[in-house]
Image (tube, grey):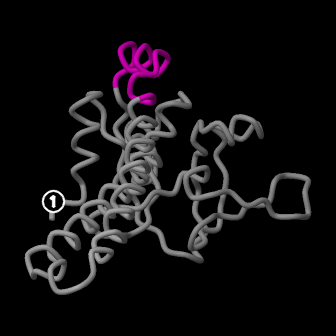
Amino acid sequence: MLHPDTISRWVTRATGRTLDQHAADPIPAAAHLPDAAATLRHTRTELLLAVDRLRTLLINDDDLTATVSTLAGPLETIQELAREYRYARNCIDALIDDPARAVYAEANPGRSVRRRHVNPGDTVLVVLPHTDSCRSQNLAGHTIHITVGTSDARFRPRGSVNPLRLSHADAGIYRDPTSDRLYILQAAADEAAASDH
């Protein structure tokens, strides 16, 4: 199977920026690229596995010793996954081709960021990305303390007694496709400032 970070390398070649650099850009299309890449990566992996299962079935002659319908299930699965793949690919292509993202990237060099691994239960300081959801709630670009969950994050807005939940993508939490670990991004300037204290 191909290296799981193939999608990240493809986006970097297509845009001149890494997914981490896109995540730090204050443009919705850029902020959505890491999540779209994760969706495409997952769908592509599932499609590869389904094709491998069908190939194994044919190599082992299982299609000859069982009923003709033995092929129907795997073929339907492949067709459904191919539709999901096409949708995921169209989504990421639209984000890559987004005019506002391209104009911003051309006018501004990609920020230097580093990854900091986190675990569920950790409370960390993040800058919320400029996703559509964060923008609609006037949260984009704000620096807040969040508590990392397994699939979302919690924080308590100022003046509120109830915590607010955000998906990992909206909370600035990403999953490394090679190690499967969660991480947040920190600007290189923030890292330098932290080491001075």
Residue position for label 1: 2
Q: Position of residue 102 (x, y in %)?
A: 40, 18
Q: Image quadrant of residue 129?
A: top right
Q: Position of residue 146 (x, y in %)?
A: 65, 61
Image position of 103 with respect to 133: above or below: above
Circle 1 crowding by C-alpha within 10 Å: few under 14, some 14–19, many from 20: few
Q: Image quadrant of residue 33?
A: top left
Q: Main secondary structure of the magenta part?
A: helix
How many marks on residues? 1
Name the one closer to the observer, 37 or 164. Answer: 37
Name the one closer to the observer, 121 or 37. Answer: 37
Residue flagged by tag 1: what amino acid is it?
A: Leu
Name the quadrant of the N terminus.
Answer: bottom left
Image position of 159 with respect to 64: above or below: above
Magenta span contains residue 97 = yes
Taking the spot 65% from the left edge, 36% from the top edge, the residue there is 132
Q: Is residue 12 left or right of residue 56?
A: right
Magenta span contains residue 145 = no
Taking the spot 70% from the left edge, 64% from the top edge, the residue there is 154
* Segment tinted magenta in the rendering: 94-109
Q: Position of residue 190 (x, y in %)?
A: 45, 45
